[in-house]
Amino acid sequence: MAAEPTPVRRWSPPPLIGNPVLRWLALLGVVAYLVLATGSIEINWVRVARGLERSQRLISEFLRPDFVSRWSHIQRGILESLAMAVSSTLIGTLLCIPFGLGAARNVSTPVVYMLCRVVIVLARSFQEVIIAIFFVVMVGFGPLAGMLTLSLATVGFLAKLLAEAIENTDPTQIEAMRATGANWLQIIVYGVVPQVFPRFVGLAVYRLDQNFRNSAVIGIVGAGGIGAVLTTAMSRYDYSVAGAILMTIVLLVLLAEYASGIIRARLQ
Amino acid sequence: MPVNVIDGRREWRLRDRRGTLLRWLGTFAAVLLFGISMQYISSLTIWEFVADSGRQIGDLFGRMFPPQWSYAPRLWGPLWDTVNIATIGTLVAVIVAVPITFLAARNTTPHAVVRLAALLVIVVSRSVNSLIWALIIVALIGPGVLSGIIAISLRAVGFISKLLYEAVEEINQEQVEAMLATGASKLQVIAYAILPQIRPTFVGVSVFRWDINIREATVLGLVGAGGIGFQLNSAINLLLWDRASLIFAMILVLVVLSEAISARIRQAIT
């Protein structure tokens, strides 16, 4: 008597999108987009090939960093970046408080709410470099323009998160204060601030680290900092100096992130 | 809560003496640091220019309005390029980031040395802004959209890998053990025990990075890496501020739209 063949049972994981029509349409859409998008990229393969040939020399220059010959410039760039990061974080932190309060629905009035939201969206939507273009036109080249740029970016970032934190506060505490006849300022100081303060300080420290990172970029449009030194080195084809600057940036960003992580952990 | 005893009266204080002292010292240090920084910055500032800034900005806004709407048709192409740089850049970054994630997570890495190498890749990728990556890539392979895509993905790989490997390290280990007990291979464990657990984080992080990438892609053209930033740069160099304001408006709409889409998707998956 022959043994009955055991039926083979196969299992496959359930698909992400249940409806098969929708699933295939989504896939088709993705493929169509990719075809369209890659079709519009013009690649100059000759240039790429030539670049790859040269890249060996370029990369080897990057990896032989020259810290010495332009050290005074690098040093000045680092100091500018640090000064910009510190001052803009403090200015931004102070300035974001009125905007954050205004943009929190539960402690603000509708008109103020709309105004503050518009300011926040404007400050957040533009990349720092674009804001820097404006400030460079306004106050000239140099770290002051960078400081103003980073301050504005900090206001946008912190005010939004502060407003969210205030909107997420426990309403019963505020209600209890209101019942005792507290005025708006008293509600903010004793009802809201204690609830949002730890998170807010953590965010401000995080922003210090972010501002330092961004200070390395806005130099491209003349707003000072280590980015300005890097741009100069790149446009002089001075790749071993550029390599040294890049390594300095990576190291300092790492240090800043490590420090801000420690501070935030201790604050919690 | 500390209570001070003054002349036999008990008085409530918010903080004890040490806390108050530390707080004052912290504030003092911050103010001192701020003062030093401000002094350094102002020593490098030409104040005549600053005094002139009100007139400058008034002049600038005067030139910016009305925007040169007739230029809009020539901007759709660069705008499409900008979206593509961000989207394809994110896709490439996701594909590269997934293996790096599993090499970097403590519980899935094959070897401690491999983990260290993966972490180094993540750190370097994250520390350098995409605009600086673009500067380097343009020097290597020349200007264009391709350089933008590479620059965006070089920066995004570290971002995505870091958030993902932290998620992988926090998964529920019991599912992995259950799979191992059935004799599953390492790849099977990753596919059926780990991936399902990190899928929400994975989608959320990718979509979040996509919307940051859109914002970054708008300025890559300033260093020649494609997208609408190139038009912005030439408009500014030619002092055509009415054209620049049109580009600013388009960037604003694009960024606000992409942020809304990304927020919507992230809300849907959590």
Image: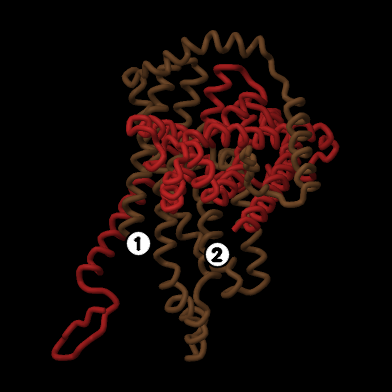
Question: Which chain: red?
Answer: B
Residue located 16% across and 86% down the image? B6
The residue tagged 2 is A164
Q: Report crowding for label 1: few under 14, some 14 to 19, many 20 or more residues within 10 A (C-alpha).
A: few
In terms of sequence position, does the residue under pointer 1 or pointer 2 come before the other? 2
Displayed quadrant of residue B240: top right
User: Relative to residue A115, is residue A211 drawn left or right?
Assistant: left
- Please say which color scheme the image uses: by chain
Q: For the C terminus of chain B, which image quadrant?
A: bottom right
Displayed quadrant of residue A213: top left
For the question of whether residue B66 can be seen, the reply is yes
User: Helix or strand or loop: what does disc 2 sit on?
Assistant: helix
Residue at mark 1: chain: A
The residue tagged 1 is A268
| Residue extending furthest toward the left | B7
The picture places residue A264, in percent across and down from the top left corner, at 36, 55
Q: Look at label 2 and name its amino acid.
A: Glu
- Judge by depth and name the residue closer to the eye, B268 or B145: B268
The picture places residue B199, in percent across and down from the top left corner, at 56, 48
